[in-house]
Image (cartoon, rainbow, N blue to C red):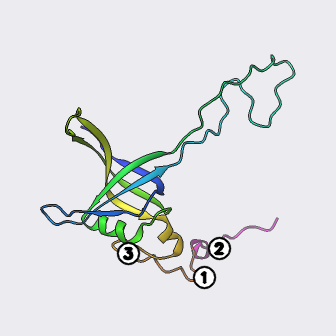
Amino acid sequence: MSLNRVILLGTLTADPLSVGGGAARLARACFTLALDPPRSRRPSPGLPAQGASPPASAPPALPSSPMPSPRADFIPVLAYARTAEIALEFLKKGNRAIVEGRLREERWKPPHSSERSRLVVVAERVTSLEAARAGTSLPGRGDPPPPAPVGTGALERLPAIKTRGM
């Protein structure tokens, strides 16, 4: 048994492109998602947290070695059919989006070169966080439920608890 599932949260580097529909004439879109580098919240073992002074008994600190600055990862994404239509309509450069899908390896051999390959994400579901922030709903997701009327929450439905006077 194997599991091929990817969930990414990132920023679009450009507007999605509509690519040829192929033999089945399905809508196809491609875009690149930039993923922020992970941020370390915990200090490395044996090092004080940022802003904290080392203990008085600590040996003198060694000069720190230059660490490469973390960089973003750029992930190619392909979408088909209705998912592609939604991506083309709602996603724009700079928008934050959640992409759910699976990994697929693409292989090709350019003339006068060796075989090349790359991993791409085939999107099965795309959610624009900008559309959610603006209060609009995406097609196929349904409208958000209306807000509950005041006074109908769970706390108001609990029976009153009788206590003895203290």
Compare marks 1 and 2 and give the one earlier in the sequence. 1
Q: Residue 62, labelled with which disc?
A: none
Q: Secondary structure at mark 3?
A: loop
Task: State the CA–CA distance, disc 1 to disc 2.
Answer: 19 Å
- The residue at 27%/38% (across/down) is 117
Dot 2 amino acid type: Ala
Write the residue at 72% across / 68% down: 163
- Quarter of the image that includes the C terminus: bottom right
The quadrant the N terminus occupies is top left
Residue 150 disc label: 1
Residue at image location 74% in from the left, 22% down from the top = 63
Q: Which residues are magenta?
A: 154-166
Tag 2 and tag 3, C-beta contact below 8 Å: no
Residue furthest out toward the left:
23
Q: Earlier in the sequence, mark 1 or mark 3?
A: 3
Q: On the image, numbered disc 2 is attached to which residue?
A: 160
Q: Which label sits in the foreground, 1 or 2?
A: 1
The residue under the point 81% across, 18% down is 60
CA gap between label 2 and label 3 equals 37 Å
